[in-house]
Amino acid sequence: MSVLSRCLGVVLVLAGVAGCRGEAPAAAADGRLTVIAAGGLVEPAGEERVIIPQVSGRLSKVLIAEGDAVRAGQLIAEIENSEYRAALAAADAEVQRREAELARLRNGARVEEIAAADAARAEAAALERQALAERDRREDLVRSKLIAAETAQQARAQAEAAVARRARADADLALLRAGARAEDVAAATAAVAAARAERDRAQALVEKSQIYAPIDGHVLKRDLSEGETVVALSPLPLARIGNLTKRYVRADIDELDIGRIREGQVATIVSDAFPQQQFAGKVVRVSQRMGRRNSISGDPAEKQDAKILEALIELDGTPPLPIGLRVDVRIAAG
């Protein structure tokens, strides 16, 4: 078949696709239809989501299989987390203890404690008066030479001890009535904050051990099974999830064609995996940044480092193209 015949065949295909959609194909100024050829990859709506665990450990539960439908927020796997849960329980208990200490400082002494301290002070004051009186009596007897000086000395020591006990009782009562110092409350408040931060860290580890689906969709592939060990942020994911309600093709538009690509242009998709079949679509988004080629054909003559512009093509209906399939794209352009 000649080059002219092949080009005419592509033109007729694109004209037929456009006619089915009720649209006229784009044409050049002289009325001829031009075509942008590109390679592309099939992807789900919203792109494929690769699920990679954030913590290492043994998979104790894997609740999905390939092809399963999942909902956003659904638990799909769990990493062994008994140590994380124990650490969380200990951290929660520490928070409660620190909060109780802070509350005690802020509330001050109870009425009963103040009453007991007041009674202890009154008792100490009574003993002080008794000791002082006994001291004075013995000193009079010493001056009258009725008792030995050592006996008076013993009374003086007992009186000094009674005075000290009464002073300590006064201080204890005053301390209870004054309440906690500002710096003690500040230190207790900081201790509560530190305990809560540790609890939040332990809670985060428990949550990271439970893996949830990020979107509504289907499990495209499951790479790991129950009982296997996962490594945090490893290149090997747990699973891949995609929304299959719509399929798209991400096409690599060559640098020489980027001036002709537009949103709304009609596209035809073909693949060696589906011979004699063509799938229609429409350009719905054109990237604003050049990048590296995504679709690699394996042709040694193909420039691997060529800069391309991505164009996203929405496919009509629900074609049977698997996610990740390399396809050939033909876009009708004026």
Image (spheres, grey):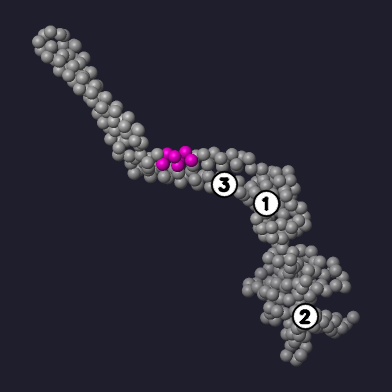
* Residue indicated by mark 1: 75
Determine crowd level at label 2: few under 14, some 14-19, many 20+ residues with C-alpha closer than 10 A.
few
Identified by mark 1, the residue type is Leu
Identified by mark 3, the residue type is Gln
Determine crowd level at label 3: few under 14, some 14-19, many 20+ residues with C-alpha closer than 10 A.
some
Please name whichever residue, 31 or 304, is drawn nearer the observer in this view of the structure.
Answer: 31
Question: Which comes before the other along the chain, label 2 or label 1?
Answer: 2
Identified by mark 2, the residue type is Arg
* Residue indicated by mark 2: 21
In the rendered structure, find residue 47 and report the number of the disc placed on it: none
Report the Cα–Cα distance between label 2 and label 3.
54 Å
Q: Is residue 99 left or right of residue 276?
A: left
Check contact, mark 2 vs mark 3: CB within 8 A. no
- Residue 34 is at least partly visible in this image: no
Task: Measuring from the top left, give residue 197's x and y in whole percent.
Answer: 50, 47
Report the Cα–Cα distance between label 2 and label 1.
41 Å
Question: Which comes before the other along the chain, label 1 or label 3?
Answer: 1
Please state, as top left, top right, bottom left or bottom right, where the C terminus lies in the image.
bottom right
Please name whichever residue, 141 or 126, is drawn nearer the observer in this view of the structure.
Answer: 126
- Residue 224 is at least partly visible in this image: yes
Q: Is residue 228 left or right of residue 101?
A: right
Task: Give the residue drawn at x 45%, y 42%.
Answer: 99
Determine crowd level at label 1: few under 14, some 14-19, many 20+ residues with C-alpha closer than 10 A.
some
Task: Measuring from the top left, give residue 149's x and y in whole percent.
Answer: 16, 11
- The mark lying in front, picked from 1 and 3, is 1
Question: Which comes before the other along the chain, label 2 or label 3?
Answer: 2
Q: Is residue 10 left or right of residue 112?
A: right
Q: Which residues are magenta?
A: 96-103
Report the Cα–Cα distance between label 1 and label 3.
17 Å
Q: Secondary structure at mark 2?
A: loop
* Residue indicated by mark 3: 203
Task: Measuring from the top left, give residue 289's x and y in whole percent.
Answer: 63, 72
